[in-house]
């Protein structure tokens, strides 16, 4: 009873602080580990993506495959960003059909499958099959054949930063000499 009230309050505060310190330390450690894991993740790590626009769609399946449908040549930057979010590094061109200048890497058939579409470009891409340091090349242009028109496409798998061979489809000449499909 000979202690002043301030001393009792200060001692109680110190005891509470010591009692809560291990919990605060554990929470700080958990936050630090979480931030470290988030920062160490690859920027091209695949995420579940479901984007369905009038011009194109990108949807990740439960097995990690990515279904892509291109109906119109609109917003190539948005499509490239969406594919990157799905874990697919890509060089994408609209209006010019580009393919790797040095030829495809042999794994393209394991990465990309072109499906039949009603004049659309319909693809299934397996990002997990892409070797490290590679990117998918997709070049899409419009071709005219008589009164018909459609999309001409070239696909390739190349090392990041490799040069591309680009051509503009020639109206009235079929696909304009442009390679179409998987080559």
Image (spheres, helix red, strand yellow):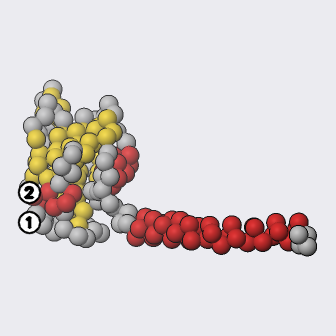
Q: Nearer the viewer, residue 147 or 76?
A: 76
At x 31%, y 35%, the residue is: 52
Q: Is residue 34 above or below residue 51?
A: below
Residue 121: % across, % down: 18, 40
Q: Could you give the CA–CA distance between mark 2 and mark 1, rounded to whole angstroms?
A: 7 Å
Mark 1 neighbour class, 10 Å CA radius: few under 14, some 14 to 19, many 20 or more = few
Q: Secondary structure at mark 2?
A: helix
Disc 2 and disc 1 in contact, CB within 8 angstroms: yes
Q: Closest to the observer: 59 or 10?
A: 10
Left or right placement of residue 161 versus residue 125 in this view: right
Q: Label 1: which residue?
A: 106
97 over 100 or under it: above or below: above
> Foreground: 48 or 25?
25
Q: Compared with residue 121, is residue 2 higher up or lower down, i.e. above or below? A: below
From the top left corner, tell me how far across and down residue 31 is, in percent: 51, 65
Residue at the spot 16% in from the left edge and 69% down from the top edge: 102
Q: Which residue is mark 2?
A: 109
Q: Secondary structure at mark 1?
A: loop
Measured as percent of width and height from the top left, residue 125 is found at 18, 51
**Image-based side of 171 in relation to 28, left or right:** left
Q: Residue at x 70, y 71 (%)?
A: 15
Using the image, determine if residue 26 lies above or below residue 155: below
Residue 98 falls left or right of residue 11: left
Residue 164 seen from this side: no
Q: If the image is split into quadrants, where does the N terminus sit?
A: bottom right
**Residue 60: x percent and y percent?**
25, 45
């Amino acid at each position: 009873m000979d202690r002043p009230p301030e001393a009792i309050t200060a001692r109680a505060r110190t005891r509470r602080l010591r009692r809560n310190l291990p919990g605060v330390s554990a929470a700080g450690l958990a936050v630090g580990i979480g931030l470290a894991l988030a920062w160490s993740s690859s920027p091209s790590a695949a995420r579940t993506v479901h984007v369905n626009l009038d011009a194109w769609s990108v949807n990740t399946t439960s097995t990690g495959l990515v279904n892509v449908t291109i109906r119109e040549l609109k917003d190539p930057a948005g499509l490239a960003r969406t594919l990157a979010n799905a874990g697919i590094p890509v060089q994408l061109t609209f209006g010019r059909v580009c393919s790797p200048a040095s030829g495809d890497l042999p794994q393209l058939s394991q990465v990309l499958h072109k499906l039949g579409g009603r004049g659309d470009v319909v693809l299934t891409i397996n990002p997990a099959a892409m070797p490290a340091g590679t990117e998918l090349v997709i070049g899409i242009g419009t071709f005219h054949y008589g009164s018909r028109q459609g999309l001409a496409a070239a696909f390739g798998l190349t090392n990041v930063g490799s040069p591309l061979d680009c051509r503009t489809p020639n109206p009235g000449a079929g696909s304009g000499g442009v390679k179409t499909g998987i080559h």
